[in-house]
């Protein structure tokens, strides 16, 4: 790519490039269902997933859980360290054996500046903000059944593996779906039964086979 005056345009460094430059970068292996960090922890690090999956969640004082998002290989999480308090308000839990790279906030920001990667960091933070705003909008404006369909399609496109006309998504429970949708587990079970009868999904244990086209058709209906 070149600029209007014919000069070659310098590629913008990615956040992975920043991790490659951090001198104190550490790799941490986390077993399934173990925490990378938990609510209340003193932790000022940013993380990059090398392999595996991590879910971010929050809990109310009454013990009600909310699943915020699920991240997979190549994604960065832990941005809450940028608030300067070094105390986590959310938990990050491995959903399967996971390898993460950890960089302290200070070292990470030093390398962002050295690499002139502020644009990549701002894009990343803007994407996270848009994700949260979209989730709030859906919660307020869309019925629970349609929210579930949107989430299943999103997870399938992000985490799924091709299986004929389906995308296979492993290790997602009805409890986790209820936490991200904001409804009860029995309602999730009832919605999933309807989706199976309509051919939107197939299930076996905690594995969900999502038919993306049928879910898109379902969501396109008034």
Image (cartoon, rainbow, N blue to C red):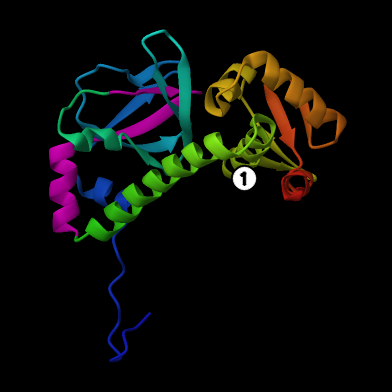
Residue 109 is a magenta residue: yes
Image quadrant for the N terminus? bottom left
**Residue corresponding to mark 1:** 157
| Residue shown at the point (75%, 25%) measured from the top left | 192
Instruction: State the count of labels.
Output: 1
Query: Whole-percent x and y of residue 179?
Result: 53, 22
State whether residue 108 appears in this view.
yes
Question: Above or below — where is 170 with respect to 218?
Answer: above
Residues in magenta?
A: 89-115
State whether residue 23 appears in this view.
no
* Quarter holding residue 77: top left
| Residue shown at the point (74%, 34%) measured from the top left | 209
Query: Whole-percent x and y of residue 121?
Result: 28, 52
Q: Is residue 189 left or right of residue 24?
A: right
Query: Whole-percent x and y of residue 26?
Result: 25, 32
Instruction: From the viewer's side, name the closer residue of 144 and 77.
Output: 144
Residue 207 is a magenta residue: no
* Quarter holding residue 203: top right
Question: Above or below — where is 207 with respect to 219?
Answer: above
| Residue shown at the point (21%, 38%) measured from the top left | 82
Q: Is residue 128 left or right of residue 116?
A: right
Q: Secondary structure at mark 1?
A: helix
Q: Is residue 85 left or right of residue 102?
A: left
Question: Above or below — where is 184 with respect to 80?
Answer: above
Q: Is residue 94 left or right of residue 219?
A: left
Report the residue that reaches farthest toward the top: 62
Instruction: From the viewer's side, name the closer residue of 59 and 173.
Output: 59
């Amino acid at each position: 790519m070149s600029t209007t005056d014919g000069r070659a345009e310098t590629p913008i460094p990615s956040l992975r490039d920043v991790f490659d430059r951090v001198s104190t970068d550490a790799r941490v292996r986390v077993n399934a269902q173990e925490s990378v960090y938990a609510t209340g922890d003193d932790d000022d690090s940013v993380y990059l997933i090398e392999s595996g999956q991590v879910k971010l969640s929050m809990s109310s004082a009454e013990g009600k859980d909310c699943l915020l998002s699920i991240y997979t290989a190549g994604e960065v999480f832990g941005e809450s360290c940028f608030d300067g308090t070094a105390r986590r308000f959310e938990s990050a839990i491995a959903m399967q054996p996971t390898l993460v790279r950890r960089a302290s906030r200070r070292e990470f920001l030093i390398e962002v500046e050295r690499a002139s990667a502020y644009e990549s960091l701002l894009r990343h933070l803007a994407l996270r903000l848009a994700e949260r705003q979209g989730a709030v909008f859906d919660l307020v404006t869309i019925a629970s059944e349609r929210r579930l369909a949107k989430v299943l399609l999103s997870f399938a496109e992000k985490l799924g593996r091709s299986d004929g006309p389906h995308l296979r998504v492993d290790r997602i429970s009805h409890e986790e779906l209820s936490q991200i949708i904001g409804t009860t587990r029995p309602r999730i079970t009832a919605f999933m039964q309807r989706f199976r009868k309509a051919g939107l999904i197939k299930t076996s244990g905690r594995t969900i086979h999502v038919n993306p086209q049928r879910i898109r058709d379902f969501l396109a209906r008034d």
